[in-house]
Amino acid sequence: MLVTAGPTVEDIDPVRYLSNRSSGKMGYAIAEAARSRGAKVVLVSGPADLQFPDTIRVRTTAEMHRAVMENAADADVVIKAAAPLDFRPKSAAPQKIKKKSADLVLDLEPTEDILKDLGKHKNGRILVGFAAETENHLQHGLEKLKAKNLDLIVVNPASGPDSAFDSDMNHAIVIKSWIAWCNC
């Protein structure tokens, strides 16, 4: 089993970076639960203050993409609970950007789409994705399930009292692929 966890980080300059609020708790909990039930688990994790044996530590989305694609072939199940960034700066400044640069514009480019690439190369493995959404949870979850060729998606509210962030408890919508494809 391959599990991913945590955020990724993309540098703006040597001091600052873009990231998100993912703690990695969900991915680590899934990895531990699977291991305690006898599964051989490899965990690919972005920066997180958590520990798990057989963890491949990464920092950027490109590093996570590479580690996941290199290890997915050995997995019957891939659970992608990580929250890699969707965008990165087109280029990182070589020196700290000074505050006097008042009209700073940050040009972004898309990062690698790990889940989509996994969905293109499923080869019979079960693929589970996660989505943190701020609105239209069900609709966006169904769209992602279909677009990424997933077997299951867990949609987490990313704002409000049921937020998936900064909590040990989580409210989620779980959608199976056969529901998404039926005309019911």
Image: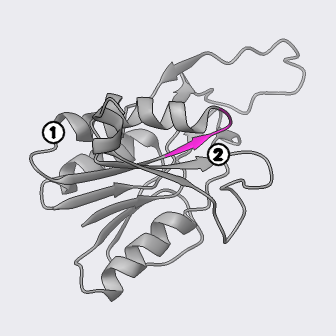
Horizontal and vertical percent for residue 51? Answer: 49, 78
Residue drawn where x is 57% and y is 55% of the image: 172
Q: Is residue 122 left or right of residue 175?
A: left
Identify the secondary structure beneath mark 2.
loop
Residues rendered magenta in the picture: 131-135
Q: Is residue 107 above or below residue 85?
A: above
The circle drawn on residue 20 is 2
Dot 1 lies on which element?
loop
User: Which residue is found at the position 70% from the left and 42% from the top?
Assistant: 15
The residue carrying pointer 2 sits among few (fewer than 14), some (14 to 19) or many (20 or more) residues within 10 Å by Cα, namely: few
Q: Amino acid at mark 2?
A: Asn
Magenta stretch prevailing secondary structure: strand
| Magenta highlight on residue 132 | yes
Residue 96 in view (yes/no): yes
Q: Which amino acid does the dot numbered 1 rest on?
A: His
Query: Of tags 1 and 2, which is closer to the observer?
Result: 1
Residue 121, disc: 1
Q: CA distance from mark 1 to mark 2?
A: 27 Å
Decide: few, some or many residues near mark 1? Use Cα within 10 Å; few <14, some 14-19, many ≥20. few
Image x and y of residue 9, in percent: 56, 44
